[in-house]
Amino acid sequence: MVIPVFLTCGPNEVLVVSGLGHGKPAMLAGGRVLVFPGLQRWRRLSLNVMTIKVHSPGVYTVQGVALKVTGVAQVKISTQHPDVLAVACEHFLNKKQEEIHALITATLEGHQRGIMGTMTVEDIYKNRALFNSRVFEVASKDLYALGIHVLSYTITDLSDDHGYLKALGMAQTAQVKRDARIGEAEAKKDSEIQKSLAAETLLAAQYINKTLVAKAKRDFELQKAAYDQEVKSREAEANLAYELQSCKTKQKIQEEKMEIKIVEKKAKILVEQQEILRQEKHLDVTEKQPAEAAKYKMETLAAAQKQKTILESEATAEAMLLKGEAMAYAIKAKADAEAAKMIFKAEAWKEFGDAAILSMYLNTLPKMLNGVSTSLSNTKSIKMVSSGDSPVGAQKLTQEVINITCCVPDMVKNMTGVDILKTLSVA
């Protein structure tokens, strides 16, 4: 039974896995992967930067001068593209680090020698940047095909065994010294010329200065005379102006005094006005406002009393109106009741006829007799006069009551036209 194993690799190396499940080798730059021992194989390839020192002793330049050149290059396995990394794995996967170093060193040395053979000693000595760039460009293209990325290249040492570079330096030094002496002489010559020119310029400047001084002195005297005349004229004008200004000042002072008096007068008037206002306010507070308050109070009380009287009158009128309406309604109701009662009585009389009239008469007759009797009973004294054989005393009084009662049918007939006796006789 095959037990799978997890493999890890850091960012500074690439893990190449081949075998079961991989048509092409899997390249993992940093990370982990599951492998099956016996069915798959794996190798590691370092991605660290390699420092390569390239020594080229006795290399002839285009002039035939042998030079010793030492260069330093920084290179590493390229991971810029999977195809380039695959080429590097193909070339260096089973090689040791020393073998990879030797291969890169040999390639760089060949390109370094080739570039030196196309340049002069002066070019290499004076323009090392050009030599570095040429070697870097050629070596980068060649090593990129092997999967190597050249990071940098530079010359660290340049020498020869025949003293060419020393002589070149001496000649250069002599030339520099010669140029220095020539420059010193030229500077000295220029300095003397400049001194002469400066002296000439100084004399010319002195002459010009003297001329200018004389001219300036003349102009000064002329200007002074003109200025003196102008000063005297100005002094006279100033005196006149002073007197005029003095008069104006005195006038202005008088005007200011008048203005002060006017201001004082205005201030006094303002104070008097303020005093009047104060007295008016005092009078307003002590006299006017209390009077107005009393007036307002009396007006308010009068208005309230008036409103009260109006409301009481309105209430009385309303009460009388309501009372009249109630009495009218009561009278109307009573009249309606009496009318209804009379209607009912009339209908009853129509139904009972003479018997009803007789009954009413009989019911009313005792009341009439009682009324007559009551009137007689209230009499304090009665004097009765009898003539002939007419009765006297109580019999006479009783007869008078009966006679009054017998007069009632005639009275009713005279007042209403109803003959009670006839109605009773018919019944």
Image (cartoon, grey):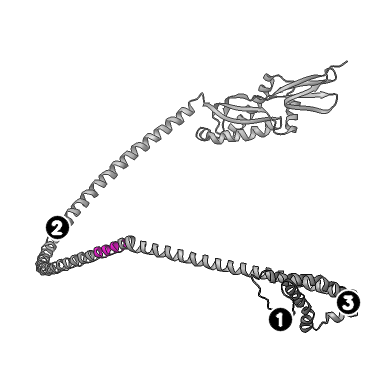
Which of the 4 image quarters holds residue 324? bottom right
* Rendered view: 13 above or below 395: above
Of the two numbered discs 1 and 2 in the rendering, the one whose residue sits closer to the viewer: 1
* Rendered view: 36 above or below 272: above
Where does the magenta region start and end? Answer: 270-281
- According to the picture, the residue beneath numbered tag 3 turns out to be 354
Residue 387's label in the rendered image is 1
Residue kind at label 3, given as amino acid type: Asp
Q: Determine the CA span between mark 3 and mark 1.
A: 41 Å
Residue at coordinates 60% horizontally, 33% vertically from top-left? Answer: 135
- According to the picture, the residue beneath numbered tag 2 turns out to be 213
Query: Seen in the image, is 159 located left or right of residue 24?
Result: left
* Element type where label 1 sits in the image: loop
Is residue 330 something one can see in this rendering? yes
Q: Position of residue 287 (x, y in %)?
A: 32, 62
Query: Seen in the image, is 316 located left or right of residue 257?
Result: right
Earlier sequence position, callout 3 versus callout 1: 3
Residue 97's label in the rendered image is none
